[in-house]
Amino acid sequence: MGFVLGNLGIEEMERRIGITFPDELKKILEDTRQQNAGNVANGKWHCFDEPFMILCGDYDFAEKIHDLLSPYQDFMEEKLQIATEEGTNGR
C-alpha cells in the first residue's frame, strides 16, 4: 500500500461524506473499528483521511462494510474507498 494518513472516527467519516448513519450502523462500526492502522485484524476496519479509505482486515469483512454502506452511496458527498489488508485473494 502507498502512503496513507489519518485515523478517522465515525463522526469524522459522517461529516466528510455528509451523512448521519443510523444508530444500528454506528454500533456495528464502533464495535469493529481498529484504532491502530498497523495490521488491521480480520473483522476490523480503520479509516484513513488521505486517501479517504476504509481499510478492512479481510475480504469478507470488506464485503460486509460495502453492503452496509452501499444504501447510502447515492447520498455521499465524497467517494469512499474500501480496501483490504490481505488483498483480494483472487476475488
Image (cartoon, rainbow, N blue to C red):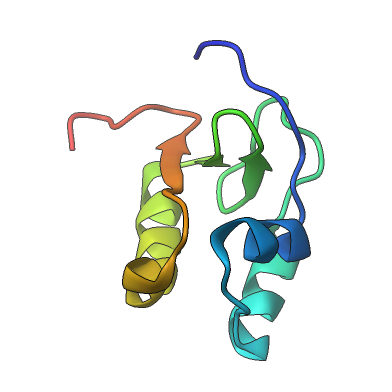
Question: In which quarter of the view is residue 73 placed?
Answer: bottom left
Residue 89 seen in this snapshot: yes
Give the residue at x 46% y 52%: 78
8 versus 17 height, above or below: above
User: Which residue reaches farthest top?
Assistant: 2
Q: 4 or 19: nearer the eye?
A: 19
66 versus 81 height, above or below: below
- Residue 36: image x %, image y %? 80, 35
Horizontally, is 50 left or right of 87 in the view?
Answer: right
- Residue 8: image x %, image y %? 74, 47
- Residue 12: image x %, image y %? 74, 57
User: Which residue reaches farthest right?
Assistant: 35
- Residue 90: image x %, image y %? 18, 29
User: Which residue reaches farthest bottom?
Assistant: 23
Give the residue at x 46% y 42%: 58
Give the residue at x 35% y 56%: 63
User: Which residue reaches farthest left?
Assistant: 91
Horizontally, is 43 left or right of 82 in the view?
Answer: right
Q: 24 or 32: nearer the eye?
A: 24
72 versus 62 height, above or below: below
Horizontally, is 51 left or right of 48 in the view?
Answer: left
Q: 20 or 58: nearer the eye?
A: 20
Question: In which quarter of the view is residue 72 placed?
Answer: bottom left
Count of marks overlaid on the render = 0
76 versus 37 height, above or below: below
Residue 56 seen in this snapshot: no
Question: In which quarter of the view is residue 13 placed?
Answer: bottom right
Q: In which quarter of the image is the C terminus?
A: top left
